[in-house]
Image (tube, coloured by chain):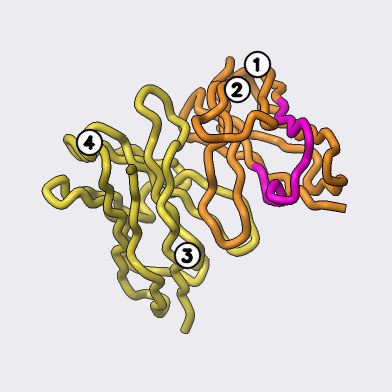
Amino acid sequence: EVQLVQSGAEVRKPGESLKISCSGSGYSFTSYWIAWVRQMPGKGLEWMGVIYPGDSDTRYSPSFQGQVTISADKSISTVYLQWSSLKASDTAMYYCARRGSSSEYFDFWGQGTLVTVSS
Amino acid sequence: DIQMTQSPSTLSASVGDRVTITCRASQTISSWLAWYQQKPGKAPRLLIYKASSLESGVPSRFSGSGSGTEFTLTISSLQPDDCATYYCQQYNSNPLTFGGGTKVEIK
């Protein structure tokens, strides 16, 4: 069974750093791209970027380029999303999602990680 | 960026009704469109890919159609379990973009 399991909810202050994770199992982790998708409170879905764990090839949405870093550790089947300096506007639910084998839709999703940034 | 516009933003219908949601792309995306269902507090779930292909395990009352710039998601007979927000997503080009969502409620 394909599973993406994300790390738990986080509360941080503005200016702090954070790294959240997404661990995959039940499939060949290095063979599928994993994306991160943001959902701000009460809002829609926004694609942030994607990584291929096999070689860590990474693509970012222009809206998120330079704002976050996506990385992977294939030895432990885990992808990460990190911030070096959080802002209140980073408060959102973050989902990881597996890209389909031949196309860029998302066939499996993690349960989401809620990030709250507040002073 | 390709803009995806969904209509309506909210829809209220009775159990058993046929429901149609529209998604329009700001430029042609061929058939590179997916539909997702999201229930409150849950992750999105893939329903349809390549505009009209039903994902495994999704009830057959869901169907998708369209190509180019105009697409529809149809629920042939609305069930209580279908209360959710539905999103379209284009994957013709990066950045991948989603529609604003359509919330479906039961009357």
Element assignment for label 1? strand
Q: Residue furthest bottom?
A: A119
SS state under label 4: loop
Residue B77 drawn in magenta: yes
Amino acid, disc 4:
Ser
Q: Which residue is mark 2?
A: B51
Q: Is residue B102 visible?
A: yes
Q: Colour of chain A?
A: yellow
Disc on res. B67: 1
Distance from the alpha carbon under mark 3 to that under mark 4? 31 Å
The magenta stretch is B72-86
Residue A108, quarter of the rendered image: top left
User: Residue shown at 85%/48% (left/top)?
Assistant: B12
Could you tell whether B10 is left or right of B57 in the image? right
Which one is in front in this view, the residue at disc 1 or the one at disc 2?
2
The image quadrant where one finds the N terminus of chain B is top right
The CA distance from mark 1 to mark 4 is 32 Å
